[in-house]
Image (tube, rainbow, N blue to C red):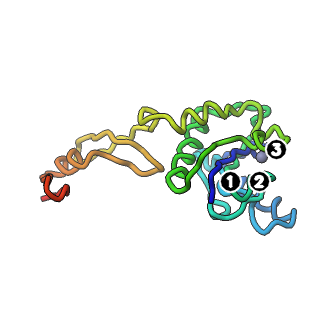
């Protein structure tokens, strides 16, 4: 069972265009490991932040002694001993953590340095800020605008899925929403 999320940095600069994932995988295979050590790699590719899956989330990691069995390991590409994570990176990682929390009974989110003698994920990576963003309320979720037949509906972006109020969406499409109190269901007519 996975009860920890452990954050790492790659301690290498993010190329921003090509996938750093491949270099990390190659490095880990060269150490004789069977796969990349982490469950997720967060990096810029084509200048957009993406999360690339490594090992299956239920799989044992090779990331941090003592936390490999019960931890889900995220490696953020960058060197946060030298640079500072961007707001965008914090929010992106927080969103990934929230998704993981929906799938596993996570009790703690820590940096690699909280569990082993290392500076990873770098002294400039503010774990308190990340934890705040993860447990933050909906205000911290990104708004997303959905244009429907010329009407604009504002929803929320959660795990890269857009959520908008059903009634607003359906009425913009000129259908009717009927709420049935008895079986607590919504019918679209
Ligand atoms: Zn680490």
The CA span between labels 1 and 2 is 9 Å
Residue for point 82% across, 66% down: 33
112 relative position to 104: left or right: right
Q: Secondary structure at mark 2?
A: loop
Work out whether residue 175 can be spotted.
no
| Mark closest to the chain's N terminus, 1 or 3 | 1
Which mark, residue 71?
1
Indicate the quadrant containing the C terminus: top left, top right, bottom left or bottom right.
Answer: bottom left
Determine which residue is flagged by label 2: 63
Q: Secondary structure at mark 1?
A: strand
Looking at the picture, tell me which residue is in the foreground, 120 or 78. 120
The CA span between labels 1 and 3 is 13 Å
| Mark closest to the chain's N terminus, 1 or 2 | 2
Residue for point 70% across, 31% down: 84
State which mark lies toward you, 1 or 2. 1
Question: In x, y percent, where is residue 45?
Answer: 63, 50
Question: In x, y percent, where is residue 53?
Answer: 62, 59
Q: Quadrant of residue 32?
A: bottom right
Determine whether the beta carbon of the residue marked 2 sits less than 8 angstroms from the nearest atom of ligand 1: yes
Question: In x, y percent, where is residue 159?
Answer: 48, 50
Determine which residue is flagged by label 3: 116
Determine whether the beta carbon of the residue marked 3 sits less than 8 angstroms from the nearest atom of ligand 1: yes
Q: Indicate whether 28 appears above or below 76.
A: below
Looking at the picture, tell me which residue is in the foreground, 22 or 143. 143
Dot 1, how many residues are within 10 Å of its Cα: few (below 14), some (14-19), or many (20+)? many
16 relative position to 66: left or right: left
Residue for point 20% across, 51% down: 170
Q: Indicate whether 140 appears above or below 161.
A: above
Q: Residue furthest bottom?
A: 34
| Mark closest to the chain's N terminus, 2 or 3 | 2
Is disc 1 in contact with disc 2, using a CB cutoff of under 8 Å? yes
Indicate the quadrant containing the N terminus: top left, top right, bottom left or bottom right.
Answer: bottom right
């Amino acid at each position: 069972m996975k009860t920890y999320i452990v954050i790492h940095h790659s301690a290498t600069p993010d190329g921003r265009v090509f996938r750093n994932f491949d270099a990390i995988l190659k490095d880990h295979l060269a150490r004789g490991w069977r796969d990349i050590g982490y469950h997720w790699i967060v990096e810029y590719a084509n200048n957009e932040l993406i999360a690339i899956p490594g090992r299956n989330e239920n799989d044992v990691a090779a990331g941090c002694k003592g936390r490999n069995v019960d931890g889900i390991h995220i490696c953020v590409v960058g060197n946060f001993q030298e640079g500072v994570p961007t707001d965008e990176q914090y929010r992106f990682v927080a969103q990934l953590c929230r998704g993981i929390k929906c799938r596993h009974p996570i009790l703690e989110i820590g940096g690699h340095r909280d569990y082993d003698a290392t500076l990873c994920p770098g002294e400039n990576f503010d774990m308190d800020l990340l934890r705040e963003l993860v447990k933050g309320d909906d205000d911290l979720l990104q708004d997303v605008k959905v244009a429907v037949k010329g009407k604009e509906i504002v929803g929320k972006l959660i795990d890269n899925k857009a959520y908008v109020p059903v009634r607003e969406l359906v009425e913009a499409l000129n259908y009717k929403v009927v709420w049935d109190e008895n079986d607590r269901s919504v019918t679209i007519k």
